[in-house]
Image (cartoon, helix red, strand yellow):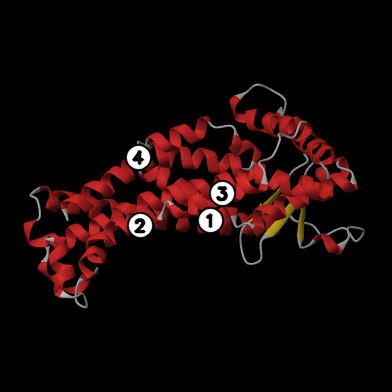
Amino acid sequence: MTVCLLLLSAVAVTAAVPVPRALTRAEWPEREPVVALWVWQCLVATVLLCCLTALVLGAAAVFHTVRAQVFATAPPAVTEAYDLSAAPPWAAALTLLLACGAAWTTAMLARELVEARRRRGQTRAHLRERAPELPAGLPSARGPLLVLEDEYPDAWWMPGNPPQLIVTTGALHRLTSHQLDAVLTHERGHARAHHDWLLHLSTALATGFPRIPLFSHFCDQTHRLVELAADDTASRRCGHLTTALALIELNQHRGVLSCASSHRLLGERVDRLLEPPPRLGRRHRALTTVVAALVPLLPLLIAFAPGLNALA
């Protein structure tokens, strides 16, 4: 059992500190934002699974009731293989620490979801007061739209059931038909991929554990990569140039081409659309996806290894 806890701790620390730092310096995520999002999710899943399996093993070693529940159907040889009776003195402290971490993570996730739902409700109520009737000339094929009277061009999506697309009259007047299609396709890309759940998860983990590099980088990179992924969705349908021009027209009043840190991502997105980076080959993309999917299995293999050896 001691070896399992040490291996789980080593995998968790590796996935939480050096790997995310190396991933943020890599160039390929800009070319494949969807694959990069998958890799980040697999890293987070690996750390969470390591902590969860270590918590279960530690609790089984410290508390006889938990041990009886976890190994209730296991053969005696499997229970003996874990050697739970000879738990190290630090197992109790580690179990308590992991239990507190699990409770804190659950609280942060619940808080983020409750706050997001509250903000969404307030925003919907505010929009219902501001929204005029949808112009009759706007094709209904573009999906459910909420048009706001505003001189500044803007468009965004609001999660919900169903997701709501919001566009201002300034955007309708300033953007061409093709540019408007690109903007709406971008926003629908967010809705179809359920990017709001990723954003909530990354924000909750970064808020709860700001000193852990994986979670802070996961939050920053998620906010960046979801925009790149939605840009790719729009550019595949409407073209890179049309999407770039729509992005410029939509954000020109915000200083899209300025060097300010708050607008730097907008400038990077425009440059990326005007000069699309070379994409990974299909085999490379598939290999990266498969390897990333296998990484979260490491904690399970480590946890089940003593039992499998005993059965063999």
Label 2 and label 3: CA atoms lie apart by 33 Å
Between 6 and 141, the one lying in front of the other is 6
Q: Quadrant of the C terminus?
A: bottom left
Question: Identity of the amino acid at label 3?
Answer: Leu
Label 4 and label 3: CA atoms lie apart by 21 Å
Provide the residue designation for mark 2: 106
- Of the numbered discs in the image, which one, if any, rests on residue 14? 4
Q: Secondary structure at mark 1?
A: helix
Question: Identity of the amino acid at label 2?
Answer: Thr
Which of disc 2 and disc 1 is earlier in sequence?
Answer: 2
Q: Secondary structure at mark 4?
A: helix
Provide the residue designation for mark 3: 287
Q: How many marks?
A: 4
Question: Identity of the amino acid at label 1?
Answer: Trp
Between 255 and 305, the one lying in front of the other is 305
Observer-side mark, 4 or 3, equals 3
Question: Identity of the amino acid at label 4?
Answer: Thr
